[in-house]
Image (tube, rainbow, N blue to C red):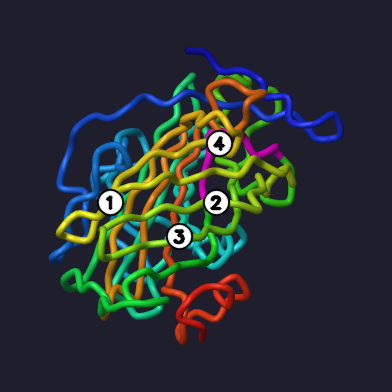
Amino acid sequence: MSRFWVPLLAAVALGACSTDEGTDGGGGGVTPGTSPATPAALKVNVNEIIFNGTTLQVNINYLDSTPRLVDYERVPLLDTGGYIAFMIQEDALDRLFVALARQSDDGSLRASTVADGGQFNRYFGGGVYARTGDFQRPAIGTGPGAGQVSYAGSYAAVTNVDVVRGSPTDVAKPVLSGTDPVLIPAQSSRVSGDIFFNVNFLDDSINGAIYNRVLIDQSLPLADIVLVRAGIAADGTFLGGAEYNDGNNTGVGVYGGIFGGVGANSLAGLVNLDEFNKDWQNEREHGVFVLTQCGPNNTLPVCTQVAPFP
């Protein structure tokens, strides 16, 4: 599949997308500890990410650097909605990978996503989540908030849509004038948004949505994404489908994650979209979320509308 130009808006510079290569097996894919493994549908090209809240090491197929597990450089310019950014690019003609990561406020969960913007008709991306400690359901009783709870916060993602060279968020190493465009690697454009989940721990169900979505490097609004009902496994993990909010249940990918902390105080996970704009082709998005349960530890405005009230 070849690279192509994406028509953003008439007033916005054009950016390109590269297609994904798919999964290539690989290692365990989780931070050391007791955490269940991240599903292949969310890991995609990632073998392992080790994130301690401050530093990030990544093992991804393919072509980021050597050794296989490599230190990424902190890049605050690309921090997105509370998710801290990292990058690696060995030289001006090597792939540029951007990663976004976050640790839960209680320290029980971590999740990270990474992708390059593409080069030579392919891009590579994916993510992992990890937990310290075991899955602990909240107390389940009767009435509002007694086993049915909500989670809310910010969402961030990397895509295979190019950042325009020379724009304010361009962090790529400069190429020499006259370099053939076929050689020039692309930088991944990022997505920001908000995310909300309703969860019932009695019937082990989760569903939600990602909204207020923006392709921030181009200031382009994006469609809402619905995260349809999925079951929660005995280890506190879940995996479900993602759809447009278009009335047609149009599937666009998958989402999944894990609960952590005392009484499932925290929720973290990943999103893998194989489409996020109906007017484009071959666009891809790898998203991440790390959230706190609505209540005393999360008093965002949206949380004031759900039980138990802060």
Using the image, determine if residue 262 lies above or below residue 237. Answer: below
Residue receiving disc 1: 238
Measured in 3D between alpha carbons, the distance from the residue under mark 2 to the one under mark 1, in whole angstroms, is: 17 Å
Measured in 3D between alpha carbons, the distance from the residue under mark 4 to the one under mark 2, in whole angstroms, is: 10 Å
Q: Are marks 1 and 4 in contact (CB under 8 Å)?
A: no
Mark 4 crowd level (few <14, some 14–19, many ≥20, 10 Å Cα): many
User: Which label number is shown at residue 244?
Assistant: 4
Where disc 1 sits, the SS reads strand
Residue receiving disc 3: 197
**Is 135 positioned to the left or the right of 210 in the image?**
left
Mark 3 crowd level (few <14, some 14–19, many ≥20, 10 Å Cα): some
**Is 188 positioned to the left or the right of 6 in the image?**
left
Using the image, determine if residue 110 lies above or below residue 4. Answer: below
Where disc 3 sits, the SS reads strand
Mark 2 crowd level (few <14, some 14–19, many ≥20, 10 Å Cα): many
* Foreground residue among 226 and 218: 226
**For marks 3 and 1 on the same chain, the one whose residue lies earlier in the sequence:** 3
- Please identify, in this view, whether the residue under mark 3 or under mark 2 is nearer the observer: 3
Q: Residue furthest right?
A: 11
**Is 36 positioned to the left or the right of 125 in the image?**
left
Going 19% across and 54% down the picture, which residue do you hit? 233
Q: Magenta span covers which residues?
A: 157-165
Mark 1 crowd level (few <14, some 14–19, many ≥20, 10 Å Cα): many
Going 25% across and 55% down the picture, which residue do you hit? 232
**For marks 4 and 3 on the same chain, the one whose residue lies earlier in the sequence:** 3
Residue receiving disc 2: 210
Q: Are marks 4 and 3 in contact (CB under 8 Å)?
A: no
Q: Residue furthest top?
A: 1
State whether the magenta stretch is mostly helix, strand or loop. Answer: strand
